[in-house]
Image (cartoon, rainbow, N blue to C red):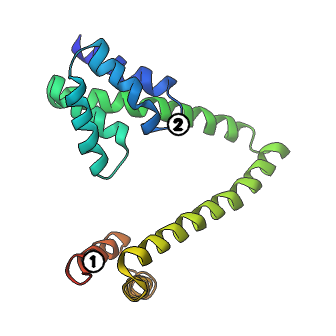
Amino acid sequence: MIYWELFLAFFIPNIVGYGGGPAIIPLLEAEVVGRYGWMTSQGFAETLALGNALPSPIATKMAGYVGYEVAGIGGAAVAIAATVVPSMLLMIAALGLLYRHRESPQVKRMSQWVRPVIAIMMAWLTLGFLLEGVNGAGWIHTLIIGVVAVIALVRFSLHPAFVVMAALLYGAFIIP
């Protein structure tokens, strides 16, 4: 029964909450604190603060932690699945619909318009990271990390994870 309650506590906010992790946090709090009483408001706030300090989406971190606290590893797996399943189902449905109508002129036009928008969004994100790097580390360190990263990726075909780790180490030991 506890697994079913965990599933519902995370599935419903994720299916009705629009806007991603931060948008569903109040819905999760209503379920976890208000409806089921698995945590206090203070405990939920502390979990949220800790979750925000770690990488990856907040909703899955909250689901994993709360699920583990309530019902161990099985509870964590159920809560994470309930968090991921709504997006996965919608994605499969949307991809199925697009695939079924892939020859449609409307779908082809839509695909042609989506690519440049994604490229612009990625460029904007890259510019934001660049400016953040310059503000935090300065032009010289940002340029060094950038040039070394390009050489490692292009010339030596180094895996991006190793490049990121090297940049983290550089930042930890070299940048004041």
SS for callout 1: helix
User: For the residue marked with disc 2, what is the amino acid?
Assistant: Gly
Q: Nearer the viewer, residue 155 or 2?
A: 2
| Figure quadrant of the C terminus | bottom left
Q: Report whether 23 appears left or right of 4.
A: right
Mark 1 Cα-neighbour bin, 10 Å: few <14, some 14–19, many ≥20 = some
The residue under label 1 is 171
Asked whether residue 64 is in view, the answer is yes
Residue 67 at least partly seen: no
Looking at marks 2 and 1 on the same chain, the residue that comes earlier in the sequence is marked by 2
Around disc 2, counting alpha carbons within 10 Å, would you say few (fewer than 14), some (14 to 19), or many (20 or more)? Answer: few
The correct choice, above or below, for 94 with respect to 37 in the image is: below
Query: In the rendering, which numbered label is found on residue 5?
Result: none
Q: Which residue is mark 2?
A: 19
- Residue 74's x, y, as percent? 20, 27
Q: Nearer the viewer, residue 172 or 63?
A: 172
Q: Is residue 80 left or right of residue 46?
A: right
The structure residue drawn at horizontal position 31% and vertical position 46%, both measured from the top left corner, is 52
Q: Quadrant of residue 85?
A: top left
Which residue appears at 23% of the width and 10% of the height?
1
Q: Where does residue 146 sit, x and y in percent of width and height?
A: 43, 83
Q: For residue 101, which quarter of the picture? A: top right
Mark 2–mark 1 distance (CA, rounded to whole Å): 33 Å
Amino acid tagged 1: Gly
Q: Please give the name of the residue rendered at 52% of the width and 36% of the height, measured from the top-left corner.
A: 19
Residues tagged 2 and 1 counted as in contact (Cβ below 8 A): no
Badge 2 element? loop
Residue 102's x, y, as percent?
74, 44
Q: Position of residue 106 (x, y in %)?
A: 82, 43
Name above or below for residue 118 compared with residue 75. below
